Amino acid sequence: MDIAANLKKIKEELGKATLVAVSKTKPKEDIQAAYDAGQRVFGENKAREMEGKAEALPDDIQWHMIGHLQSNKVKYIAPFVSLIHSVDKLKLLKEINKRAKQNERVIDVLLQIHIAKEESKFGMDEEEVRELLQSDTYKQFKNIRVVGLMGMATLTEHQDQIKSEFNYLNSLFQQIKKEYFSEEESFKILSMGMSGDYKIALSCGSTMVRIGSAIFGEREYH
C-alpha cells in the first residue's frame, strides 16, 4: 500500500478542502507514514484508541473525533482533540464544555445533521439544531466553539440521492450561518464526503472530507 502516493493523488483532487485521513483501526506505523508524507489531520472514532495514538505520535498532529462520541469518553480526548465532528445532542455539548473548561481550553465542534435515509446513522434534524442553538444552556457555554456542520449521506449506488442529501446539508449550513453565526468567521466547516462519495461532496460544497480506505487500504476489524 503506497500511502504517500495515495495521499498525493487525493490531495490533487481536493482543491481547498481539508483532508481528514481516517486512521481508525490503523497501526501507528501507517499514521507515521502518512505524517512523513505531509499529512497532519487524522480522524479516529474511539476515544481511548485516539488517546493512545496521540501519546505515541508527533505532537503537531491535529486529532479529529469523527465517530459517535459518548459523554463518558469525552474526558480522555479533551486535553488535546482539535475538532469533534459528531455532536448530536445538547447533553454531549455540555460535557465537552465542562471537560474543555477543566483543561483550560476551547474545543471546536461540528453539529452532526442526520441527512441519510438510514435510521442507524446519528445526527439531529433541522428543528433540533435550531432548538439547541436557541437554548439558554447553549448560550452559556464558554469553552466550546461551533465551527460548522457534519453529515453522512446514505450508503447507496444512487448518486442522485447522495447529491440531494449533500445539497440539502449545504443549504442548511448556509441558513444556520446566516441566522446564528453571521458575525463569526470561524463558522466555515462543512464536513461531508468519505472514500466512496467525496467527489460528489466536493461538487456540493464540502470544505472537509474524511477519507480512510482510499489512503490506507481496507479497514481491519478487530
Image: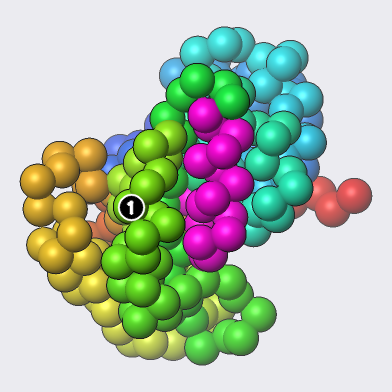
**26 to 151, vertically: above or below:** above
Question: Which colour assignment does the render follow?
Answer: rainbow
Q: Pick the residue in front: 164 or 173.
A: 173
Residue at the spot of label 1? 139
Q: State the image quarter where residue 59 is shown.
A: top right
**15 to 80, vertically: above or below:** below
Q: Quadrant of the N terminus?
A: top right
- Number of labels in the image equals 1
Q: Is residue 133 magenta?
A: no
Residue 44 at x, y percent in the picture: 64, 42
**55 to 143, vertically: above or below:** above
Left or right placement of residue 86 versus residue 9 in this view: right
Residue 152 at x, y percent in the picture: 48, 68
Q: Which residues are magenta?
A: 85-101
Q: Is residue 91 magenta?
A: yes
Q: Is residue 195 visible?
A: no
**174 to 117, vertically: above or below:** above
Left or right placement of residue 152 versus residue 16 in this view: right
What secondary structure prevails in the magenta region? helix
At 20% across and 73% down in the image, what residue appears? 171
Q: Pick the residue in front: 30 or 118.
A: 118
Left or right placement of residue 72 versus residue 189 in this view: right
At 51% across and 61% down in the image, what residue appears? 90
At 77% across and 25% down in the image, what residue appears? 52
